[in-house]
Image (tube, rainbow, N blue to C red):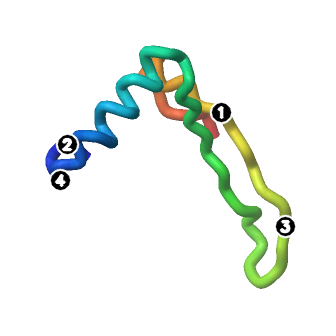
Amino acid sequence: MAKRGETESVQAVKDAMREGKLEYIVVKGGKTEGAYNGYQYRRFDITKRTLPSP
């Protein structure tokens, strides 16, 4: 975002992180093609700088 000049967005994300108001989640659809098969929802702790576990 910073490289694209989105300075207000970058600052908003930094502020949210500092205030503990930022939540990052991973949502994936089910693996069945052509039909709804639910979803997987996982939270990700961005402060640990690790990837969400599968």
Query: Which SS class for mark 2?
Result: loop
Distance of mark 2 from mark 1, alpha carbons?
Answer: 25 Å
Mark 3: give few (<14), some (14-19) or many (20+) Cα within 10 Å. few
Q: Secondary structure at mark 3?
A: loop
Please tell me which of labels 1 and 4 falls first in the chain.
Answer: 4
Q: Tell me which amino acid carries mark 4.
A: Arg
Nearest to the observer: residue 8 or residue 29: 8
- First reached walking from the N terminus: tag 1 or tag 3: 3
The kind of residue tagged 2 is: Ala
Tags 1 and 4 in contact by the CB under 8 Å rule?
A: no
Residue contact between numbered discs 4 and 2, judged by CB atoms under 8 Å: yes
Residue 48 image offset from top left, x and y in percent: 47, 17
Q: CA distance from mark 1 to mark 3?
A: 20 Å
The kind of residue tagged 3 is: Asn
Foreground tag (2 vs 1): 2
Amino acid under disc 1: Arg
In the image, is residue 20 above or below residue 27?
above
For disc 3, the marked residue is 37
Q: Quadrant of residue 54?
A: top right
Residue 9 image point, x, y percent: 33, 42
Judge left or right: residue 34 versus residue 3. right
Q: Which residue is identified by label 4?
A: 4
Position of 36 compared to 10: left or right?
right
